[in-house]
């Protein structure tokens, strides 16, 4: 078994190359969750999603993140209401976040939910969040610590 520490677009690309030479079921990717965020009431795991979508060949190749052929109706509606749109979430991507949030609310762990999502995309690579605990990237400024 090969264990890869992964975080985001670069790691997703590395894993795509690795599965070309190593059977996917022999790969375990421990994926960054320090960039996870609660937004619009949804638990968003951007690095887990980027790795999942990329390994499935479902990612947006222009941006490196999100899903190919994504639509943006929900974000358009949010913008028209004056809501925050700094973090773009496509309509199908929202489905992933809604599923994750619902399962976590039911008491499932992030590793369990990640496995369910990976399975739905037909992945052979085992994806694990780096932790089940909430963590945050912090930046120390002269004014004090701020979430980043």
Image (tube, helix red, strand yellow):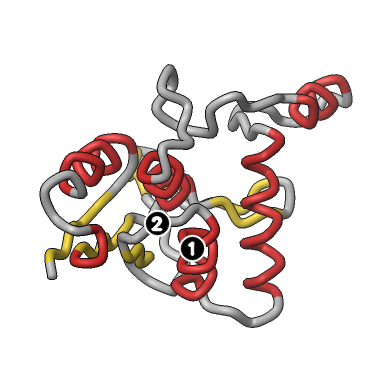
In this rendering, the answer to whether 130 lies above or below 98 is below
Q: Residue 37, how many percent across, how many down? A: 55, 51
Which label was assigned to residue 91? Answer: none
**Is residue 148 at all visible to an observer of this figure?**
no
Screen quadrant of the N terminus: bottom left
Residue 119: give its label. Answer: 1
Query: Dot 2: few (<14), some (14–19), or many (≥20) neighbours within 10 Å?
Result: some
Give the secondary structure at mark 1.
helix
Residue 113 is situated, as x and y percent measured from the top left of the image, at: 54, 69
Q: Residue at horizontal 20%, vertical 57%?
A: 5
Q: Nearer the viewer, residue 18 or 109?
A: 18
SS for callout 2 = loop
Which of the numbered marks, if any, corresponds to residue 123? 2
Q: Is residue 92 visible?
A: yes
Marks 2 and 1 sit apart, C-alpha to C-alpha, by: 6 Å
Identified at 11% across, 48% down, the residue is 21
């Amino acid at each position: 078994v090969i264990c890869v520490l992964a975080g985001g677009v670069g790691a997703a690309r590395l894993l795509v190359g690795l599965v070309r030479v190593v059977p996917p079921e022999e790969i375990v990717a421990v994926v960054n969750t320090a960039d996870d965020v609660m937004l619009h009431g949804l638990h968003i795991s951007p690095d887990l999603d980027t790795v999942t979508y990329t390994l499935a060949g479902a990612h947006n190749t222009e941006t490196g993140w999100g899903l190919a052929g994504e639509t943006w109706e929900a974000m358009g509606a949010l913008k028209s209401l004056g809501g925050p749109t700094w973090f773009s979430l496509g309509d199908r991507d929202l489905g992933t976040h809604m599923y994750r949030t619902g399962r976590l609310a039911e008491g499932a762990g992030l590793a369990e939910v990640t496995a369910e999502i990976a399975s739905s995309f037909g992945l052979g690579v085992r994806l694990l969040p780096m932790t089940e605990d909430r963590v945050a990237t912090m930046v120390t400024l002269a004014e004090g610590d701020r979430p980043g």
